[in-house]
Amino acid sequence: MLQAPKLTGFADEASRDLSKQIAATQEIGWSAISARMIGDHNIHEMPEADFEAAADQLDAAGIQIPEFGSLIGNWAKKIDSDFDITLAEVERAIPRMKRLGTQLVRIMSYAQNPWGEDQQEQERFRRLREIVARFSDAGLTAIHENCMNWGGFSAEHTLRLVEEVPGLKLVFDTGNPVFQRDRSKPEPFPWQDTFEFWEKVRDHVVHIHIKDCHNPVSDDVEPEYTMPGDGQAKLREILADAKSRGYDGWIAIEPHVATVFHAPDPAAVDWQQCYDSYVEYGKRFEALWSGA
């Protein structure tokens, strides 16, 4: 078992049933889950009784929850959406994080408007300042992910967020740059280079998400996700660099291999395949980190 960094994962990709999430985690040999979906709800949207039962179950199994994979400001919310919805999510997340001893909450910078339209940057900064401040006041750390949000347009966009939002830290997702255009470069906007993105933002990174994939055939097609190290996310280079720099934070696997997490019909998913591939992914990643 590796001691540094600490390994966790989005076990809702193994199952939406918490007992199976715990079982998959333990089968890999880990004792931590990055909490996102339990049953039909994100962890900060669960009915209170269901959340308390889940918290007790996690305690009994000795499972840590280092990270909330929240819905706050995510790719499904436009910047002109009702900000009160976001603030309510923040206020629900805080006591639940404290109940579980969770320090990190993944947030985003709202959905990308089509390139060339007004991105309402100042409104994004204003909202993120309020979000981060509320978590900071509670002694918790908000970490921004380079996903399909404003900060994911390029490393420069992410760094602008860090500059504009006091206290904001980063979670770096290794797979997301592979299927996003680099809007800091001239047209026709090449695919982002994952290692280049990492080098630019790494000083602000306190958490890492592991995905791997190939460049999609076009912007409107999902990429082909792969086992760790088999795609174009340059995992070996990033992990070797992180290790050489003494990175000792959490690293969370987010495979997307058996099924993309955002699948429209979870009922049609082969959950046994998801469980098996999640366990295999975790073991492969641990070996990849050991060899970095």
Image (cartoon, grey):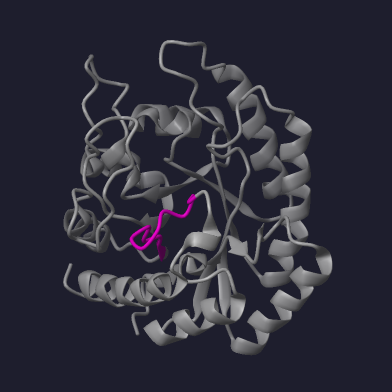
Residue 193 lies, with reference to residue 103, above or below; the image says above
Q: Residue at x 36, y 73 (%)?
A: 4
Q: Residue at x 27, y 58 (%)?
A: 242
Magenta stretch: helix, strand or loop mostly: loop
Q: Residue furthest front?
A: 268
x and y percentages locating residue 92 in the rendered image: 77, 53
Q: How many marks?
A: 0
In-image side of 161 versus 154 (left or right):
right
Quarter holding the N terminus?
bottom left
Residue 170 lies, with reference to residue 35, above or below; the image says above
Residue 33 lies, with reference to residue 185, above or below; the image says below
x and y percentages locating residue 61 in the rendered image: 60, 88
x and y percentages locating residue 138 in the rendered image: 73, 53
In-image side of 181 versus 148 (left or right):
left
Q: Residue at x 45, y 80 (%)?
A: 24
Of the pair 18 and 209, the residue shown nearer to us: 18
x and y percentages locating residue 133 in the rendered image: 69, 41
**Which stretch did the figure color magenta?**
251-263
In-image side of 243 versus 257 (left or right):
left
Q: Residue at x 80, y 62 (%)?
A: 47
Q: Quadrant of residue 165?
A: top right
Q: Is residue 118 magenta?
A: no
Quarter holding the C terminus?
bottom left
